[in-house]
Image (cartoon, helix red, strand yellow):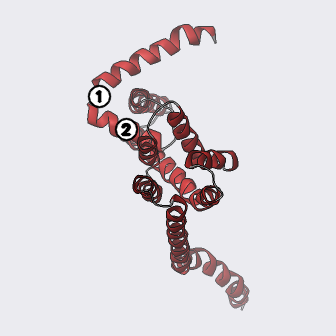
Amino acid sequence: AAFSKRVIQPVIRGVSLRVNRMLPSSISERLELALVQAGMKVKPGQFIMVIGIFVGVVPALATLYAASAGADFKMLIGTFGVMTALGLYGPRIIIGGRIKRRQKEIWRSLPDAFDLITASVEAGLGIDAAFTRVIEKVTGPFAEELTRTMREIQMGRSRRDAFLDMADRTGVDELRQLINAIVQAEAMGISIGGVIRVQTGVIRTKRRQKAEEQAFKAPIKMVFPLVFFIFPAIMIVIGGPAIIQMMQL
């Protein structure tokens, strides 16, 4: 542990800082946003280092192992190519999956959380106190992002900038619409509780429509398992004894 703190961790930090400086600003910003939306507390330089290890080291080790096992030249080339492709596209697939899963969790928690905000605002609480109450009652990625946002507001950042930054960090369109509605309502002096209630109703409607769409797709998705797995088993159970009897004649 002491060797790791004194040697390994400083080397990793130094290399990641150099990689960050070498990356173009546009690529670094997009990669950093993707990592934040995925909920990964990793810097772009560190992530590039991981990709470099998977692309450079893992294919070489896999190829050496295949060579030691007696594989021919074509197998070695195929092993190197497959492992390199996995190293290039594997991290991208992992990040994409984490982003979609995290956004889905946030999207599902929005209606209940904003119902609580609406009730708190209509009961006489301020918008900051209402969001703080949500943090106490709700768990998950949305509560984490909201905690960070409220901490930034307490440190002096404007509510508008903090909320818009939260929308960028999550990447959820419905949350962005809610935040824009809250910011506009606050600027124009409109009742925030009524605006949130309307936007929450829209989110619930979209969620119900998406559930109905998934229900309509279910029969189509069931066709392939029925044809390739269930029907053959049924035919074997029903026709198997008859075939055996015919063969014994």
In the rendered structure, find residue 202 and report the number of the disc placed on it. none
Q: Which residue shows up at 39% across the image and 36% down it?
A: 32
* Rendering coords of residue 228 (x, y %): 56, 75
On the image, the x and y values in percent for residue 193 come to 55, 61
Kind of element beneath mark 1: loop
Could you tell me how many numbered marks the image carries? Answer: 2
Q: In the shown orientation, is residue 239 left or right of residue 3?
A: right
Compare residues 115 and 185 and report the one nearer the observer: 185
Q: What kind of residue is marked 2?
A: Leu
Q: Residue at x 54, y 33 (%)?
A: 154
Height in image: 116 above or below 7? below
Judging by the rendered image, the residue that carries numbered circle 1 is 23
Task: Judge the density around disc 1: few (<14), some (14-19), many (≥20) Cα neighbours within 10 Å.
Answer: some
Q: Camera-side residue: 60 or 1?
A: 1
Q: Quadrant of residue 135?
A: top right
* Above or below 195: residue 10: above
Q: Secondary structure at mark 2?
A: helix
Q: Tags 2 and 1 in contact by the CB under 8 Å rule?
A: yes
State which tag comes first along the sequence, 2 or 1. Answer: 1
Residue density around tag 2, few if under 14, some if 14–19, many if 20 or more, within 10 Å? some
The quarter holding residue 58 reads top left
Residue at (69% x, 45% y) in the render: 136
Is residue 77 something that shows in the picture? no
Task: Examine the rendered structure and indicate whether residue 126 appears above or below residue 199.
Answer: above
Please name the residue that numbered disc 2 is placed on. Answer: 31
Say which residue appears at 71% left-offset and 90% top-offset: 242
In the image: residue 119, left or right of residue 207: right
Q: Quadrant of the N terminus?
A: top right
Amino acid at the residue labelled 1:
Leu
**With 199 as the anchor, is 140 left or right in this view?**
right
Nearer to us in this view, 237 or 40 = 40
Residue 29, image x, y percentages: 33, 36
